[in-house]
Image (cartoon, helix red, strand yellow):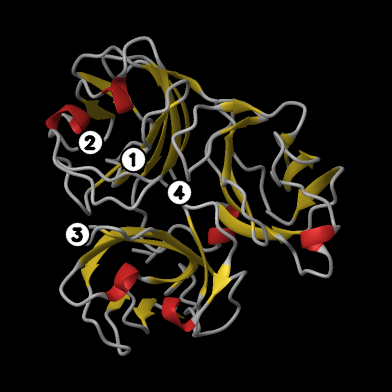
């Protein structure tokens, strides 16, 4: 049996860097038509902008806040293209996804980063749950985008993946409630909030204390995930060997830190302290840090400028990643951390080609 069914992870997930021009442009080099684009300016204080093919272009969500969905039209991401996406000007008075070259941007390298995932297009109807949903699913890569309308009562929602999601992230579109993160790596009796530094809690009304199945995920009556008559969006991830890994580890408080085995060379890693309050969602990728140590960071819960510091050090390895600092956000002794990782290369492809170290 092959180690992985995905020999080229960049066919399903890819990071691109680009320079804003304050006008219109097409961002290429993604390698596919993305269904989820998560973009952030690297050089100015400005919100993360998340767009997807189910909600439609120009409809932005901000991971660093509780803001309801914003219609950026005619700005923001204006189309999803065969090799990327198009953008138009700034967005709602901030640096958006295509700020110009003057001022803060003068003389900078590519000043935007965009992480891109392939799902299944605009979405189809799914009636497997007690709540009908619209689902854009990629069962090969284990990623789906799910839109549904809450009922305020215990319910199930079809996710379209054909295997149980390991991670689900939900936001109410017209509400200012928190983003809600659930996963096997914290247990389905608990939750975290993507937009803040809390360690969440155990509330049965979020996931109804029920792990997802191969067809549906469960909701309780909590308003952040299931407010009556309110539309919600859910990003669902099933783990795929050689492509994605969603787990946890215990920090050791040493510069010779904890090694985390993923089974592939990561292209993108998000780390969050699950038990130590006040720590954000650190986002690392191999496009912004091209060699070890990897220490160029933005946080999903902050609008802050990208920063590079030895405080953030990790090594990206051929089969996982390793903490190289004593930072409380990823390696405080005895604390539990959760992570999401997506591959640059599987450790061994189906043609038996091994991943190499950086």
Name which residue lies at 30% across and 58% down: 278
Q: Which mark is residue 315?
A: none
Name the side, left or right, on which 310 lies relative to 188.
Answer: right
Q: Secondary structure at mark 2?
A: loop
Q: Are marks 2 and 4 in contact (CB under 8 Å)?
A: no
On the picture, is 17 further left or further right than 25? Answer: left
**Around disc 2, counting alpha carbons within 10 Å, would you say few (fewer than 14), some (14 to 19), or many (20 or more)?**
many
Q: Residue, x 86% and y 57% (percent of image)?
A: 102
Task: Decide: few, some or many residues near mark 3? Use Cα within 10 Å; few <14, some 14-19, many ≥20.
Answer: some
Q: CA distance from mark 2 to mark 4?
A: 17 Å
Q: Which marked residue is nearer to the observer: mark 2 or mark 4?
A: 2
Q: Nearer the viewer, mark 4 or mark 3?
A: 3
Residue at image point 67% right, 30% down: 58
**How far across and how far down the image is residue 188, in percent?**
17, 41
Q: Residue under label 1, please give it.
A: 168
- Point out the tag, 2 or 1, that comes first from the N-terminus: 1
The count of marks equals 4
Where does residue 260 sit, x and y in percent of width and height? 30, 74
Circle 2 residue: 212
State the separation of the CA atoms marked 3 and 1. Answer: 19 Å
Query: Which residue position is annotated with label 4?
Result: 141
Q: Nearer the viewer, mark 1 or mark 4?
A: 1
């Amino acid at each position: 049996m092959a180690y992985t069914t995905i020999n080229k992870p960049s066919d399903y997930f890819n990071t691109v860097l680009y320079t804003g021009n304050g006008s219109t442009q097409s961002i290429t080099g993604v390698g596919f038509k993305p269904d989820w684009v998560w973009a952030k300016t690297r050089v100015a204080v400005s919100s993360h902008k998340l767009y997807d093919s189910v909600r439609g272009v120009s409809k932005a969500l901000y991971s660093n806040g509780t803001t309801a969905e914003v219609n950026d039209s005619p700005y923001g991401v204006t189309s999803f293209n065969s090799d990327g996406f198009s953008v138009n000007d700034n967005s709602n008075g901030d640096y958006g996804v295509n700020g110009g070259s003057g001022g803060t941007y003068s003389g900078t390298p590519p000043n935007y980063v965009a992480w891109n995932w392939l799902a299944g297009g605009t979405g189809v109807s799914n009636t497997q749950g007690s709540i009908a949903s619209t689902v854009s699913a990629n069962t090969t890569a284990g990623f789906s985008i799910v839109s549904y309308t809450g009922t305020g009562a215990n319910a199930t929602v079809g996710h379209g993946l054909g295997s149980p999601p390991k991670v689900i992230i939900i936001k109410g579109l017209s509400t200012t409630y928190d983003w809600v993160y659930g996963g096997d790596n914290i247990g389905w009796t608990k939750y975290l909030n993507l937009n803040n530094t809390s360690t969440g809690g155990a509330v049965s009304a979020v996931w109804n204390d029920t792990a997802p199945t191969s067809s549906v995920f469960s909701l309780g009556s909590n308003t952040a995930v299931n407010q009556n008559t309110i539309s919600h969006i859910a990003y669902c991830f099933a783990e795929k060997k050689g492509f994605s890994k969603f787990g946890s580890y215990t920090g050791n408080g040493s510069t010779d830190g904890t090694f985390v085995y993923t089974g592939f060379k990561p292209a993108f890693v998000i780390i969050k302290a699950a038990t130590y309050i006040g720590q954000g969602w650190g986002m690392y990728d191999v496009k912004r840090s091209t060699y070890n140590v990897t220490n160029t960071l933005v946080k999903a819960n902050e609008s802050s400028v990208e920063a590079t510091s030895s405080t953030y050090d990790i090594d990206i390895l051929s089969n996982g990643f390793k903490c190289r600092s004593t930072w409380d956000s990823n390696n405080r002794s005895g604390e539990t951390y959760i992570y999401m990782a997506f591959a640059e290369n599987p450790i061994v492809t189906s043609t038996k080609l091994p991943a190499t170290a950086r």
